Amino acid sequence: MRQLSISAAWEEARAILQRDGGLLLTVALALVALPSLVSSLINPQGMSASSSPWLELITFIGSIIALAGQLALIRLAIGPSVTVGGAIGHGLRRMPIYFVAVLILVVGAFVLAIPCVFVLGALGVPLNAKPIPVTGPVVLVSLLLVAVLIFFGVRLLMSSAVASAEDVGPIGILTRSWKLTAGHWWPLFGFLLIFVVSALVLLLAVGAAVGSVVTLLLGAPQPMSTAALVIGLVQALVSAGITTLFAVMLARIYLQLRGD
């Protein structure tokens, strides 16, 4: 089994950010921050606040572009050296294949949820109720489903790095990630947990602070308003920074698991 050191990956990530931060920032701004800004400017309240299919389509397109941005960032972090245009082109070329792999994961998550629905129905839980009553069986089955999804999520954590670094198809991406992460579930879970919690705290803190100040000075954010522009710009920059750090860490962890 290959050794895995999250601390070593962090030190390598810091060195890469210091050395190639300008290149990474350019890609992140173009493929992560800009789509996020456009989506926030048009629909500052999020998809749940609007039933317009056009707004949902714009958000979906932005998410697809962000997938290409993540692959491009990983390409830069893995090396060998490549231009910004080359990294962006690489991310766009590999994005459709990676997108299919993501769709497979989404379908798999729904398949895993089907037995839970049958179990809750057999226990007499009224699944057609809105909202579904929070009972002991509902909590237990939900926690079990979340635990299973987390297990598979950690085992498939290297999917984006594989999609960027290796010329394989959607199924190959998933099976390769499964093979690379074998025997390293706990350190990868610890890394993912710390990163996700830290990112959520940062996003919530920045969003609350900026949202309060902007609302006080410019009023409530409305579509295409100055308030929506300011809030969207700050959130887009923070999201781009988080995505960049995550992509670089995935790249360095991937190289360790690959044996480089």
Image: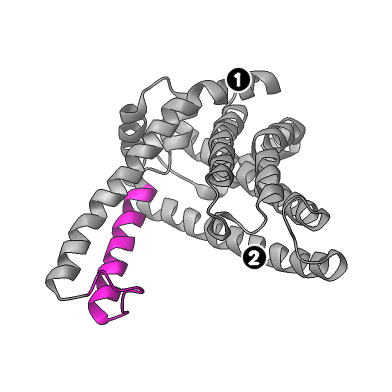
Task: Place residue 147 in its image quadrant.
Answer: bottom left
Mark number displayed over residue 195: none
Report helix, strand or loop for mark 1. Answer: helix
Q: Position of residue 190 (x, y in %)?
A: 46, 58
Q: Is residue 31 above or below residue 134?
A: above
Asked if residue 78 is positioned above or below residue 42 in the image, the reply reads above
Q: Is residue 143 magenta?
A: yes
Image-based side of 163 in relation to 126, left or right = right
The disc labelled 2 sits on which kind of residue?
A: Leu
Does the magenta segment cover residue 70? no
Q: Nearer the viewer, residue 114 or 186?
A: 114
The image shows residue 173, relative to residue 82, as above or below, that is: below
Distance CA(mark 2)–CA(mark 1): 33 Å
Q: Secondary structure at mark 2?
A: helix
Tell me how the rendering is colored: one colour
Task: Tell me which corner region of the image, top left, top right, bottom left or bottom right, holds residue 132.
Answer: bottom left
> Which residue position is annotated with label 1?
89
Q: Which residue type does callout 1 highlight?
A: Gly
| Residue 65 percent coordinates (x, y) | 58, 34
**2 or 248, which lies in front?**
248
Q: Quadrant of the N terminus?
A: top left
The residue indicated by pointer 2 is 204
**Residue at screen point 77% across, 70% down:** 212
User: Who's the residue at 82% across and 68% down the image?
Assistant: 213
Q: Earlier in the sequence, mark 2 or mark 1?
A: 1
Q: Which residues are magenta?
A: 126-154
